[in-house]
Image: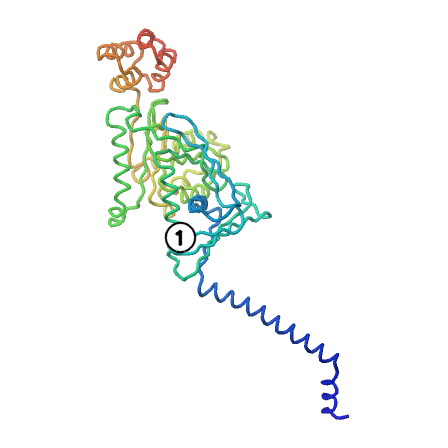
Amino acid sequence: MGLGDLISSLKDNPYFGAGFGLLGVGLLASVGRKGVQFGGVFLRRRFMVTLEVPNKDKSYQWLLQWIATKGTKTQHLSVNTTFHQTETGRIMTRYDFVPGPGAHFFAYKNHFIRVERKREKNVMDVSSGTPFESVVLTTIGRKREIFFDILEDARQLALQREEGKTVTYIVGGSNWRQFGYPRRKRPLNSVVLDSGVSERIINDAQDFAMNQEWYTNRGIPYRRGYILYGPPGCGKSSALDYSICVLNLHDMGMADDRLHYLLSIAPERSIILLEDIDAVCFNRDLAAQNPTRFEGMGKLTLSGLLNALDGVTSSEGRLIFMTTNYIERLDSALIRPGRADVKEYIGYASDHQISVMFRRFYPDQSDSVIGKFVTDVRQHKQDVSVAQLQGLFLQYKDDPIGVCQNTHQLWSS
């Protein structure tokens, strides 16, 4: 039998025809699936733009809150509970519904946006101890600017929610996290410092914030350091009217590289506060006198702190406030210009401060009563702190006569 006869017999065989047909159908289906896959990839690469925002990014929570305000078409929600302080001082609870894990949709500036919130159950964020999450935004088109607009709108919305509030951040793991709830900012005139002190600090900080170009044109690093020094209880920390990042240098896990990293990722529009820095940053002259005095301290070194404040790798555009009760204990390299550009003494209460505080607690009293109170205070105690005065006023908060008759209590406070 020749080859032609064999092919002719197979063609007439119904079993062979059915098998060949099935093979053809399977081949066509496979080619079709591959075509759809390649077509989907081609469309995404050529005609779609995608943005992924991981939960470790600063804009992650801003974006979720902003998406919630756009009224996404979903009934699958997650709750984000926050607290805020009212004008009367009451703490109110607010429940914000944000998109839950899954796909959601909304429209923005004539663009159709698909939102997918992903949660990796088997991958944990080490710093927060929560599952790793991300939000993926997808839109048709090739203009990435739409995502810049969305992120900027989300940032502005977040700033509006915190406007007029003081937000405190502390270190959690390898990142900053908000501590407590945003508190209503204290008016500048509520901080009773000596005449002109608050104004000098705030005016200098505002001048720094508005003159980045001036620093750049002159080749000066764009950063500013302040050191507030004086006796305890005199209001050194209260002089700050900004959101505050409290950095605890006493943390045994604080090392040079970690300090560098935390300063570089500090939240915007915040002041980095290093309180009681004399308890950590020792004077090299004192160390030479007593070599064993500082044994057992953490891995943070003086040179590491100096480089973080004013080194080649130190970040710019920041304000750092340091407070100390004993400026004489600080190393001279720490308090030189470039690290501590502004030094402000916050001392014991002056006659002006005593008068202002008395009038604030007892606004109906005459000038003669206030003058007599100041005289009585000075007779009993020359060096009186703002904290001591406030404690006395709180003890007699509705009794101006009682507070005037008991100034001797300042001796024992």
Q: Which residue lies furthest to the left in this view?
A: 368
Q: Where residue 56 sits: x, y (%)?
A: 48, 46
Closer to the camera in the image, 154 or 328: 154
Three-letter code, disc 1:
Tyr
Q: Quadrant of the C terminus?
A: top left
Q: In which quarter of the image is the N terminus?
A: bottom right
Residue 59 visible here: no
Q: How crowded is mark 1: few (under 14 residues within 10 Å), some or many (20 or more)?
A: few
Q: Where residue 135 sits: x, y (%)?
A: 49, 50
Residue at image coords 38%, 38% = 161
> Which SS class for mark 1?
strand
Q: Name the residue under label 1.
A: 108
Residue at image coords 41%, 61% = 141
Residue 88 visible here: yes
Q: Tell me: residue 95, above or below residue 55.
A: above
Q: Which residue lies furthest to the right in this view?
A: 1
Q: Where residue 250 sits: x, y (%)?
A: 46, 33
